Image (cartoon, grey):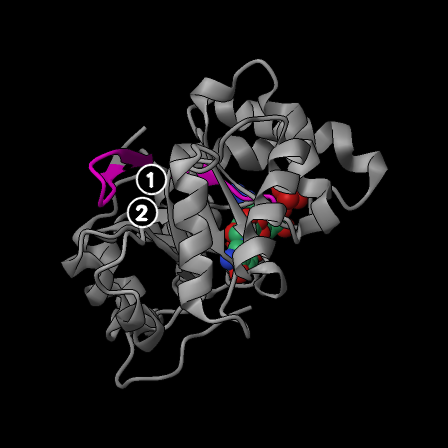
Amino acid sequence: MRFLPLPDGDKIPVLGLGTWQMGERRGNAAAETAALRLGLDLGMTLIDTAEMYGDGGAEEIVGEAIQGRRDEVFLVSKVLPENASRAGTIRACEASLKRLGTDRIDLYLLHWRGRFPLRETVEAFETLKSTDKIRRWGVSNFDVDDMAELDGTACASNQVLYNLSRRGIEWDLLPWCRERGMPVMAYSPIEQGRILRDPTLVRLAQNRGVSPAQMALAWVLSRDGVLAIPKATLPAHVRENRAALDLTLEPTEISALETAFPPPRNRAALDTL
Ligand SMILES: NC(=O)c1ccc[n+]([C@@H]2O[C@H](COP(=O)([O-])OP(=O)(O)OC[C@H]3O[C@@H](n4cnc5c(N)ncnc54)[C@H](OP(=O)(O)O)[C@@H]3O)[C@@H](O)[C@H]2O)c1
């Protein structure tokens, strides 16, 4: 596994495991737990989850998957904005810890900005840090003006939508984070599968003997300061995604992708899902 440095000097894996839509159906629990365990076995030791996913169900799946191997894992979870008051954040975190079956979260994010003043949420995050319930905190779906309000705080990362078809953050948000040594976590790095039939991606993948998903993921992983958290339940997908880390794109492949999926030409509001 490759790692990126965090602002506090620790490190974070560049490829992890998403969990959105896990924990929603009891019948899928065994396959979801097995997919996460397989990912860990293959070295994808970052797991991204949230209290929102499956109404806590995804955190329970993660808890099951990491049982007995907590120390291997870099665990990310998120508080919902409606819970992100000073007291609510602490309560939400404690409930997440219970579902996750652990005593600490490595990176705790505000899922998106809501009605509570940011200052309150940050104070709660700092309290959680001082009591060792979280190791560090960050945000998600924050645009550059929201990030500017956090300048000078201990914000460790911003998790945003980023893939070949969603390159808006390259205009100013990604450079902003890079300048501060703050890793950007790319969610939906294969656009939930929607870009995988793109003819350029398909052609390049065929030429290389890899899948379009691997090509798309390798592109995200080639970006400075960016880590990716694809979600996969099918074991074949988990294996493919891990192998994408070993795929180095050639300059000709990168330029073909640049033409098919051009970078932003002006500033636009942050894309979200
Ligand atoms: N902070 C936020 O607001 C936010 C928003 C969205 C997502 N996220 C996080 O980011 C994670 C990833 O994003 P996402 O789940 O939206 O989308 P994604 O990772 O881009 O795509 C997931 C979908 O792609 C399929 N897939 C995975 N690997 C594949 C492969 N190698 N070949 C073909 N298909 C493949 C999966 O199928 P199978 O499951 O059937 O294998 C699943 O249907 C989430 O799970 C969540 O943890 C965060």
What is the secondary structure assignment of the residue under circle 2? helix
Give the number of marks: 2
Residue toward you, 110 or 202: 110
125 vs 60, nearest the viewer: 125
Find the residue positioned furthest to the top.
68
Question: Badge 2 local density, few (<14 within 10 Å), some, or many (20+)?
Answer: many
**Residue 20's spot in the image, x, y percent?**
62, 50
Q: Position of residue 192 (x, y in %)?
A: 57, 57
Q: Residue at x 46, y 46 (%)?
A: 108
| Label 2 with label 1: CB-CB less than 8 Å | yes
Instruction: Tell me what residue is drawn at x 29 percent, y 78 percent.
Output: 264
- Give me the disc on residue 14: 1
Examine the rendered structure and indicate whether residue 133 appears above or below residue 111.
above
134 vs 252, left or right, is right
Q: Which of the labelled discs sits on residue 221, or is there none? A: 2
Separation of marks 2 and 1 at Cα, in angstroms: 7 Å
The percent position of residue 126, horizontal first and vertical second, equals 38, 48
What is the magenta range? Answer: 4-19
Location of residue 122 with respect to 132 vertically, above or below: below
Q: Amino acid at mark 1?
A: Val
- Find residue 194 and report its horizontal and vertical position in percent: 56, 63
Residue at 52% over, 58% down: 86
Above or below 12: residue 34: above
- Asked whether residue 189 is in view, the answer is no
Q: Which kind of residue does numbered mark 2 sit on?
A: Leu
Mark seen at residue 59: none
- Residue sitting at x 42%, y 24%: 43
